[in-house]
Image (spheres, coloured by chain):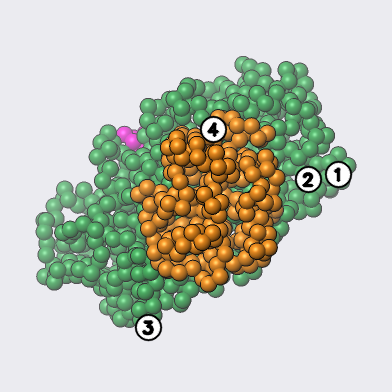
Chain colours: A orange, B green
Amino acid sequence: MKSAVVVFPGINRERDMARALKFVSGKEPAMVWHADSELPKGTDLVVLPGGFSYGDYLRCGAIAARAPIMEAVRTHAAKGGLVLAVCNGFQIACEAGLLPGVLMRNARLKFICKEVFLRIERSDTPFTRQYNAGAVIRVPVAHGEGNYVADADTIARIEDEGRVLFRYTAPDGKLDPAFNFNGATNAIAGILSEKRNVLGLMPHPENHVDPAVGPTDGRRLFESLVSTLEAA
Amino acid sequence: MIPNEPKITPALIADHGLTPDEYERFRGLIGRDPSFTELGIVSAMWNEHCSYKSSKVHLRELPTKAPWVIQGPGENAGVIDIGDGLACVFKMESHNHPSFIEPYQGATTGVGGILRDVFTMGARPVACLNALRFGDPKHPRARALVSGVVAGIGGYGNSFGVPTVGGSVGFHPRYNGNILVNAMAVGIAEKDKIFYAKATGVGRPVVYLGSKTGRDGIHGATMASAEFGDTSEEKRPTVQVGDPFSEKLLLEACLEIMRKGCVIAIQDMGAAGLTCSAVEMGAKGNLGVTLDLDRVPTREAAMTAYEMMLSESQERMLMVLKPEKEKEAEAIFQKWGLDFAVVGKTTDSSRFIVRFGGDVMADLPIKELGDEAPEYNRPFTEPKKLPILDAKSIASPVSIKRALEGLIASPDLCSKRWVWEQYDHLILNNTVQRPGGDAAVVRINEGPKALAMTTDVTPRYCEADPFEGGKQAVAEAWRNLTAVGARPLAVTDNLNFGNPERPEIMGQLVHCVRGISEACKALDFPVVSGNVSLYNETNGRAILPTPTIGGVGILDDLAKMATLAFKAEGETILLVGETKGWLGQSAFLATVLGREEGAPPPVDLAVEKRNGDFVRKLIAASSVTAVHDLSDGGLLVAIAEMALASRIGARLDSPSAGIPPHAFWFGEDQARYVLTAKTAEVPKITAEAAGDGIPVRVLGTTGGSQLTLPGEDPILVSSLHALFEGWLPTYMAGGAAE
């Protein structure tokens, strides 16, 4: 696995992401500056990490989506390369047209940091092959704008195509508005691109990999990527 | 010639917060009338906030040294040795006045300022904490203030990318006109790569870095050095505006140029901005500084020298760089999109000279500006001793169960989840003990060592007896660190009081400091940094004396960390320490009976140390499964909190004979902890305790889904949970303030 973590000004979970990638894969990812125009040769996983790119003073992710490096990321994705876009990274991916829809303010208009329950909708993806479909995992969220919204046709389409990969649910995996804390449409927490090679999700699996710190439910997402890429 | 417009009049001097005597002192120092810019400069240097003129003489009493102290008070932040070539850099600072006027921006810039203090010294911030005090929940502005301050703290820390891991939130009508926002930041640096403000070398470039200078925050520090009247709303323009995005860039850029060895001296522009930072760098290095304001990056047109010298625009730094590294440093700042400008140079003249538009706007003796600042030994009165209340004379109007329910759902003791869920407390992936425990614990790099941290103070104790209250604030911080298994190392103090020109307020300050000093000495817990916030007073009504203590300790192995949640059913619950049933100034007396009376519980520091050392030893030996310190609400509230954190109930035995049950369960005797242990471990623990002369008694057993007390209806943990978690969200949603 040869991963590259893109660093935009104001991104702040890039170290957590790099640490998780190293922890699980044993390999140090390359840190790629937003103003660069090329990814390191041989990159097989691009990560858009969390944070507040450009302070999120404009629409979240809108400025970062137009950074020089994003052209290379689009090319990588167009060729079927894997892209993991977490939190602000998800917002950037939506703004860059890599994923449909948009992330709006949380339903209660507040930033929320807590552990949530996610149901894994399918295990036949490069991101979830080490999980069982239908399994419920516990991972943290930390965002103010994670309320996933798209027009009705888009929602219908991504649902029909099985592109919703994670949903906010109760601990038993049932949909429950009380657990859809940010008000996302259909409790969507993470979606795949049409070719299923780009994943955008609001929660932070990278913060739940190390048993010395806490739960490790996020770890299998990285193990899935490692097994996908090492097998390739 | 120094242009001298507008004319200096007694009214203008008074507007700058200088007394006629202080003005004459300044005139004497420079041997002539000052210019308008110079008047501004001296008002910035000599106000209470920057000069500590009322408190300095007393702060000297505080113990500041220990073998592990690398840097005590006087720099941007304190520095302690935490082993493995690493140092912990930390400080707490208030942003009370601005947060009352403009809660979001006030709180935001409070966090930004304290983070800057920490990374100015070369440390990467690893955690933030805070201590917040608001007025009566029924006060019409209370909700807006809570909401704004919490959003502001989160807004800055979350975006900057530092976890906000702990703190405290309290309410009292005495904060109706002056809320408290005390923010603490903790960072980690390499021990031999700490950066200081002291400039060295003549003719070196003085470099301005960071955001541009605007008109915000002019006279902020002066505003924070006066009490409020009815027109404090008009002071809104003195509040700065925070930009966490710029600060994050500034952090990365500063750490990068430090790593590359470019920096000789560095000082952040905090209170009184360019003035304080330039004077401090020069004065500490026995050098003069000449500033050329034409080169200062500004974001507004036609700013005057006076405005530039007094602006408190945020996210700015002043540095002296190695001349040969200037280009490299400039390239790094440009990469991060930040302003970089050489705005002056160091000189051998001992003068602070400010040039602008071809004129000299100020020419002042640099050392005297700081060293000759007025210092007052203000008159103070001895606080009145309050009588010790006899627990037997206080009847409980309600059952133990009802009292517990009332306490657990009270504004001060209820869950603060609504607050800390708005703070990113997990970023950096090192938060091993999250908010809600006795102390937050943050792993150091890859471990196994970890830092423990807490903020504590019980203002109603300090009001009733400033000396004992000061001791108690330190003891409680020490106890909270101990309760997670950490070895307490050092503290930062944030002393919040009213108007020091009133002898009774000065009496509170003096005696609180004495109490802090005595406790810090006895517990080997030196003060390494701090901040004083006076004039927290509106229309002559002062806040409760609130000397917040931020404590830091170290755990050698985070795997041995203790937490307060019960771990399993059928374990023995033990109480360490002596229970006399002290109800004076207790949360029980205040909440259940609506009385704030009597002397607060005394703190026996020798007992405190003995009991704490014993508990820490048990934690290190893995003899105990859960640990919680006793504080507000006493024994039963502590047990309830342990049950709430685990959803495991407990069966409790009869209280001691000779103490009324409500005094036994809710008394606030100090130096106590509740522990749980596997039943097989208990004989060993009690024998060890007996050997050390420490009172330990069995309180009962964990298990079930309720708290069972002799003679009381059982208390369901789930209903207690609803009360505990319910008050704050209900209140913030507009529900009842009761």
Q: Which residue is mark 4?
A: B412
Residue type, mark 2 in image: Val
* Label 3 sits on residue: B324
Q: Which residue is mark 2?
A: B624
Q: Measure the alpha-carbon separation of dots 3 and 2.
A: 58 Å
Q: Return the residue at label 1.
A: B681
Q: For this rendering, which residue is in front, B413 or A214? A: A214
Circle nearer the N terminus (3, 4):
3
The N terminus of chain B, quarter of image? bottom left
Distance Cα–Cα, label 4 vs label 1: 35 Å
- The alpha-carbon separation of the residues under discs 4 and 2 comes to 29 Å
Residue at coordinates 39% horizontally, 64% vertically from top-left? A68
Chain designation of label 4: B
Q: Is residue B177 left or right of residue B693?
A: left
Secondary structure at numbered mark 1: helix
Q: Earlier in the sequence, mark 4 or mark 2?
A: 4
Write the start and end of the magenta stretch as one range: B537-541
Look at discs 3 and 4 and give the one toward the viewer. 3
- For label 2, the SS is loop
In this rendering, do the residues under marks 4 and 1 share a single chain?
yes
The answer to whether residue B119 is left or right of residue B658 is left
